[in-house]
Image: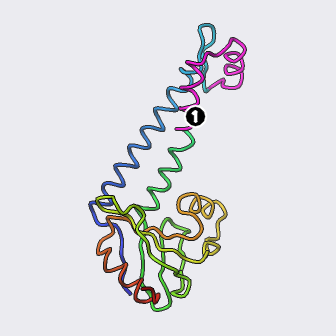
Amino acid sequence: MKTYRLDSNGRRATLLLMLGALLIWLFALWKLPDALSTENVSVSYLRLPSTLAAAINDGLSVSQVIPALLFIVLIVAAPLLIWNLLEEWSTTYVVRDDGLEYDTVQGIKVLYPWKAIKGVRIVDPEAKAPDYEVLVDDEICQIRSRTLRWLHRQAFGRSRIPIYARVGERHELIAEIVNRAGLR
C-alpha cells in the first residue's frame, strides 16, 4: 500500500490560500457594520438586532446595500473555501488491494472499491497543472457525521474524488487507479 499526498510546495500554497481567505473573511466581518451604518445610526455587532433595525428604518441607500450584500456573501463563502482548502491540505490517497482509500479531515475516510471507480478525467485541460478527478459511484454515506458529509458534498459533490495538481507522484497514482479499476 502506497500513500500519496500534496507535496511540500502544494501544502505551503494551500496554507497561504487559507490565510488569505481568513483575512478576507475578517475584513468582511469588520466592514459590514460600516456598510450598513447611516448618518443617524451606527450599526454594531454588540447590539446588532436593534442597530440594524434602526438603520433599516432610517433608510439604506443602494450604495450601502450592495457592499453589505457583498460582505455577507464573503462572510458565508470564505469559511466554505477555507474548509475546501483544509480538505485539500490534509488529503491522502492510499492504493489498497481492495480499493482506493480517500482520507482527509478527521472523520472523512472513504474506501472506494475498485469496481466503484468509473473513470478518471481532467478537470481543466488548458490549465498549466490541471486537477484530475476520479468518477465513482456514490460512497459518501461512509462519512458518519452529517455535517462533515454535507461539507464534503458541497466541496466535491457525491461522486468525485479530486486528485490535486500538487500531489506528489500524481501520474503514478492515476496510473495505479486506471490499472486497478480496469479503466482504459
Q: Does the magenta run of residues contain 58?
A: yes
Q: Quadrant of the N terminus?
A: bottom left
Residue range of the region highlighted in magenta in the rendering: 46-74
Which residue is at a point 56% across and 62% down the rendered structure image? Answer: 152
Residue wearing tag 1: 72
Q: Secondary structure at mark 1?
A: helix
Q: Does the magenta run of residues contain 137?
A: no
Which residue is at a point 55% across and 21% down the rendered structure image? Answer: 35
Please name the predominant secondary structure of the magenta segment in the image.
helix
Q: Which of 138 and 52 lies nearest the eye of the viewer?
A: 138
Q: x and y percent of residue 16 in the render?
A: 34, 49
Left or right, 68 with respect to 124, comes to right
Q: x and y percent of residue 38 in the render?
A: 60, 12
Residue lying at the far bottom in this picture: please name it.
97
Q: Which of 101 and 145 lies nearest the eye of the viewer?
A: 101
Label 1: few (<14), some (14–19) or many (≥20) C-alpha neighbours in 10 Å: some
Q: What kind of residue is marked 1?
A: Ile
Which residue is at a point 36% across and 53% down the rendered structure image? Answer: 15
Residue lying at the far left in this picture: please name it.
9
Q: Is residue 10 above or below residue 159?
A: above
Tell me the colour scheme of the image: rainbow
Q: Is residue 58 above or below residue 111?
A: above
Residue lying at the far top in this picture: please name it.
40
Q: Is residue 34 above or below residue 8?
A: above
